[in-house]
Structures are given as structure tokens and as C-alpha cells.
Amino acid sequence: MSQNYYQKEIETMSAEEMKKLQSEKLVKQVKHVYENVPYYKNLMDEKGVKPEDICGIEDLHKLPFLTKADLRDAYPYGLLAKPLEDCVRIHSTSGTTGRRVVAFYTQHDVDLWEDCCARAITAVGGTKKDVCQVAYGYGLFTGGFGLNGGSHKVGCLTLPMSSGNTERQVQFMMDMQATILCCTPSYAAYIGESLKEQGYKPEDIPLKAGIFGAEPWTEEMRQGIEKTLGIKAYDIYGLTETTGPGVAFECSEQTGMHVNEDHFYAEIIDPDTGEVLPEGSKGELVFTSLDKEAFPLLRYRTRDICVLSREKCSCGRTLVKMAKPMGRTDDMLIIRGVNVFPSQIETVLLKEGYEPNYQIIVDRVNNNDTFEVNVEMTPEKFTDKVADIIAMEKALANSMKIMLGINPTVHLVPPKAIARSEGKAVRVIDKRNLI
Ligand code: DLL
């Protein structure tokens, strides 16, 4: 594939020039955050760091980290660095107020985010001649709007399908001759199955490329999707805290994702000590937004385990590459692309009058995540009437859906049926083998 760049000057910039650009942006950004975010100013003051101490990227390590706990403490406006009236958008993850991430964007932030997504689309060969089907969820989730914006910037004919309604996805794909599909890898595999069931062969499908992310997926899954859809399948990474999709994207080489490091500076740290690790080490990925205005997180700990590499890439991009995330340092699960914390299930159970004796069982069947929750009935709630049990299971599943944004299958089991552990309770059985 001939190489296409959306912003060639940046994407192929020399290491020295990139460092200079990052340094200039960082100095400005630290000042902006220190002056406008009292929460982060306090963290810097506690650490004895002043904006004047940050003269370039080499000083980044002096700054304090931000974690999800900080986001929780500062919820909802405590990390906002611009007046609300200058913000034009929010996006959010699902969850309780404690777990929910709410990110704010000025128009400048939306623009730079969409540029990142446009780079990703261009890197897979997207041009204004393409028809780009966006089947990530639209709404508070960042996937739909992010890639929608990128697709517009590239000039593709954009199909804002959102996720779900697979029959309609297939129909639009065929009728509009979609050439690029953007969705989670599990949904891509599901769409592929549906096309196959309807008798379409890979050569009948107009798609040429897919941009799949928001959840872990394996090389085997990539090969499966590529075969069923007759396309090249590319990875894309991002998180709500930093903007959304497009923080990093794959190129024709398909060996990891280039980080848009003119906007997001990546570090790998030892998750236990916080020490910055040298290139090639496995550790926790940390991002600093270098030029976001409204929600500019500095040294944000993603909890994703990853490796960075500056090896030369055949696509000509010089942007540092991150490997596929290799797991997490916390207990967050990603089920059907939605972030789920076991503590959210616990919150629902307690609210509904159950004890927190439960087990989450996640599997992947036909490339689709299954999500079951076994819950013990309390002695007070115990019944052996099937109709009552079914009604209770439905009510509980509904409350969980409201909390999480996805629907589990709930099984009520008799009191004491879930094995007690002598150590840490085994709350999650994940059979998906994603790494
Ligand atoms: O998942 C943003 C996104 C949308 C990325 C569409 C790509 C495509 P959150 O819901 O905040 O944001 O979840 C962020 O998802 O910390 C990772 O653990 C995981 N994740 C995202 N992309 C990938 C990927 C969006 N390509 C969290 N591979 C991150 C593995 C991923 N994990």
C-alpha cells in the first residue's frame, strides 16, 4: 500500500524536532494547568514542583501522577482547566459517579481529537473516495463521535450507524458499498458472521479495511476477521480521559500502534514504584496531554500494561509505537467494549438488598462476549418458585444494565452456593484468553 499521511510533517517528524515541539507544548501546558486547576496545583505544591521547574520533556518526571482516584476525588469539575462556557462537549464512560470518567472538550480539543482519528483513517488507506461505516456506539462513549469526526476530516462519505441493529448494518454496508468499517473487533467479527450466514463471500463484501479497538483482541482474532470480511484489520487505541479513540493507531505494517505523540506524550513506568522505565520495557502506560485545553491530564496512569518502541517503521512514520495492551494493573474488565468494574456489580447488589456474594463469568463465544453473573439469594429472599426466581433475575439484570450500560445474564443461586475463598475472593472468571 502506498503510504498516506494526514499530517505528514508531524507524522514523519525527526526525533529532535518532535522533542522540541513536545517540550514547547509541555511548558505551556504545565503553566495552564497550574494556573487553572487548583487540584493539580496542590499536587505540584505538595511535591515541591513549580511550573518554572519544567523546561522541557526531560523534566516531565518531576511532575506528580494523576490516577483514576484523582478523577474520582475531583469529580465532576475539579480537573477542568477552562470555564464551562468555553466547553462544547462532554463524553463519559459508564458507571457510578465514582467510577465514571467525565471528560470535557473545547472546540480546539474536539479538533485535535478528530485530527488524530483522521490520521488513523488515512493510515489504513482512507481518502475522500471512501465510504466509512462507523459502527461504534454514538453518545457518551467516545468511539462513534471520534471516528465520525475523523471520517469527516478525511472527507469520506460517513455512515453514522452507531452500534447494534446488525441487519441494518449489513444492508447499509452492501447498499452504500462501505469500504472502511469502524467498530469493536468483537462487533466486526459478529458482522462478519452475519454476512457469512446471509451467503456473502469475502469477495462480495465491498470493505477494504477495518479500524477496530476499544477492547483487547488477539492476532488470531485479527486473522479471523480479515478472512471473513476479506479486509485488512487495524488496531486503534484510546481512552476517554485523553480524548477517546486515536491516541494511537496502526499503520500498514500492523505491528503496533503509532502514538500521536505531538498531542499525547507516552511514558512507561513501573506500576509499583512509579519509576520511568527505558524504551522496550513492559510497564504501565502513562499519558500527558500536551495541548488539550479543557481536560488536560498530566502524567495520567492508564492502568494499561504496555511496551513502547522507537524501532524504524516501514510506513515512514516516526511516531513512537505502542504494543497491543497486555493487560491491566487494576480489575477493570472490558466486556463488549464496555468498561466494567466488579465493584459496580457489588454496588447494585447492595442497593437491591443482596449480599455481595457473586461471581462474574466472561467468555467469548463466536467472537462475542458472554457476560453472566451468579448471585446468591439471601435467606430472606430465598424462594424455590421458578416464576419468582425468573422475575428477580430479570429485575437484577435490569439494574445492572442501568449501572453498566450492558446487559448481563443473571443467575440466582441458593444461599452459600458460591464457594467462599480463604484469601482474595475470586469474583471474576474470564475465560477469553485475550492476551
Ligand atoms: O475505549 C476509546 C476507544 C473507542 C478506543 C474506540 C478505540 C476505539 P474507554 O471506554 O475510556 O475508551 O476505555 C479505555 O479501553 O484504557 C484500554 O484498557 C482499553 N482499550 C482501548 N483501546 C484498546 C485496544 C475507549 N485497541 C480503555 N486494545 C483503555 C486493547 C484497548 N484495549
Image (cartoon, helix red, strand yellow):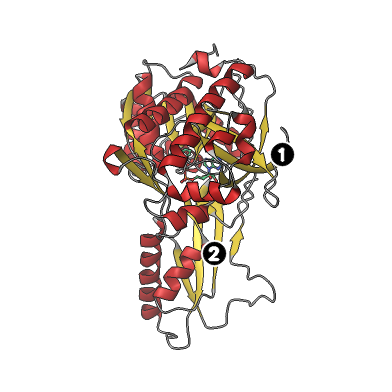
**Residue name at image x 57 percent, y 82 percent:** 416
Q: Secondary structure at mark 2?
A: strand
Instruction: Name the side, left or right, on which 167 lies relative to 325.
Output: left
Q: Would you place residue 214 above or below residue 110 in this image?
A: below
Q: Is mark 2 within 8 Å of ligand 1?
A: no
Quadrant location of the N terminus in the rendered image: top right
- Residue 127: x and y in percent read 41, 16
Q: Would you place residue 24 above or below residue 305 in this image?
A: above
Circle 1 packing at 10 Å, graded few (<14), some (14-19), many (20+), is: some
Badge count:
2
Marks 1 and 2, how far apart at CA: 34 Å
Picture disc at residue 352: none
- Residue 275: x and y in percent read 70, 44
Which residue has dot 2 on it?
360
Q: Secondary structure at mark 1?
A: loop
* Residue 66 is at least partly visible in this image: no
Quadrant location of the C terminus in the rendered image: top right
Q: Earlier in the sequence, mark 1 or mark 2?
A: 1
- Residue 18: x and y in percent read 58, 20
**Residue name at image x 46 percent, y 43 percent:** 241
Label 1 or label 2, whichever lies nearer to me, is 1
Q: Would you place residue 318 above or below residue 347 in this image?
A: above
- Residue 290: x and y in percent read 50, 32
Picture disc at residue 277: 1
Q: Is mark 1 within 8 Å of ligand 1?
A: no
| Residue lying at the far top of the rendered structure | 2
Three-letter code, disc 1:
Leu
* Residue 110 is at least partly visible in this image: yes
| Residue lying at the far left of the rendered structure | 85
Q: Give 138 or 407, whichever is nearer the viewer.
A: 138
